[in-house]
Image (cartoon, grey):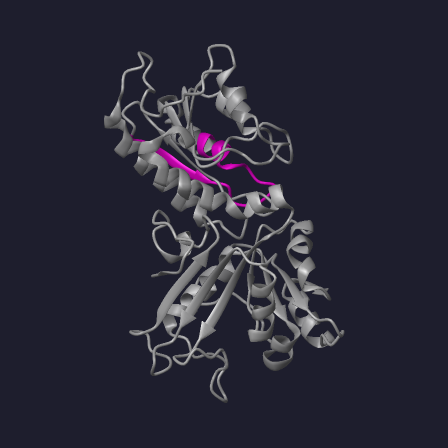
Amino acid sequence: MTERSSCIKSRPDGAIDEARLPALRAGFEAALREAAQYLGATSPNPAVGCALLDAQDRILVVEAHHRAGTYHAEARALERARALGVLHKAVTALVTLEPCNHTGRTPPCSEALRASPVGEVWIGARDPNPEAGGGAARLSTMPGGKTVVMLESCRALSDIHQACKALLAPFAERITRGRAWITVKQALDGRGSMIPPQGQKTFTSEASLLLAHRLRRATDAIVTGIGTVLADAPMLTVRRVADHDGPPRRMVVVCDRKGRLPSSWRSTLEGNGYRVVVSRSLEEVPSLLAGHGVNWAMVEAGPGLLDALDRHGLWNDWLTLRAGASGNDTVSARISARAQGVTPLRFLLNDGFSSVSSSEAEF
């Protein structure tokens, strides 16, 4: 196996070629940005991006996986390069996730790359799925093998490696732990209360509402409580940003121990394309979601459910939207996040390459 232990020793003569690093960084950033556009559309698959570079490390094409059952990022990139008549120029592939090595609904991407002119494959993160992993080994052990470079061994691009892990985090949580990634979204007024003024449903700023709808778009499911349903009858639609193409495929889990869910509300959501599931046990929700193929779920609920989630440690990151002291104040509103390790929230909060720390960080 010719998998490289140092990312800057990628020339055939083994010489250090640090001059390539800015172009490689730019290519990975483009692949990550493209992949992040499809968060919320690919489950149960992960969001993945791929950039193809020419011999001068210039970007030829950038593609991403769009939806489960369609071509993966690598295959899409190769096909687009072929359609543009530039496939013969493709020398390097930058992939945010190790190319798959199994046949599912689509052929293995490792084989597509093996059959391509690409001679060097840079991999942002290893595939945690034992059924699909092994693409790196497959590529590097073929006759005349491809050069495979893992970003985990590349100190100069360690921030890109972390970004690739953050993009992968919801999928990895489901595959390795059997539970969905849970993001709590909490809106507070200037006094720290979650209760909107009488006659209003929200007190957060337009900027906060935009972020909340971007989060709905990026996630595969919404978890709420029966109290929220009875009080607000929320439609849980994506607004303020364009949703993914096609009918919504999100799952809605309602925590309802006493069977109070209104059938009319459930029928309305299901008529809009949502899958509605009732859970009588909060502790089962992460595994319940994973069992339905959900990678990433957001929680939109009242203080009682959020307190219970916090007590039981049933969350991976926590997004807080605080209104200013005067209420709905765009200027003084604050957005902060807490995360237990790397988090996909970075792709919604900033450019995707500045990390969210395990302590509270403001944006």
Residue 242 in sight in this render: no
Q: Reply yes or no: does residue 73 show up in magenta.
A: yes
- Determine the image quadrant of residue 117: top left
- Determine the image quadrant of residue 313: bottom right
Residue 65 position in % (x across, y down) = 50, 41
Extreme front residue here? 311
> Nearest the camera: 8 or 86?
8
Q: Residue at x 37, y 82 (%)?
A: 327
Question: Quick check: 359 left or right of 25?
Answer: right
- Determine the image quadrant of residue 224: bottom right
Image height of 269 relative to 83, above or below: below
Extreme bottom residue here? 198
Q: Quadrant of the C terminus?
A: bottom left
Q: Residue at x 50, y 55 (%)?
A: 218
Q: Residue at x 34, y 73 (%)?
A: 333
Q: Reply yes or no: does residue 339 show up in magenta.
A: no
Residue 298 in sight in this render: yes
Which stretch is magenta? 58-78
Image height of 237 relative to 287, above or below: below
Residue 160 position in % (x across, y down) = 37, 39
> Nearest the camera: 152 or 44?
152
Count the marks.
Answer: 0
Q: Residue at x 50, y 24 (%)?
A: 136
Residue 312 position in % (x across, y down) = 61, 62
Residue 256 position in % (x across, y down) = 70, 71
Image height of 283 relative to 137, above or below: below
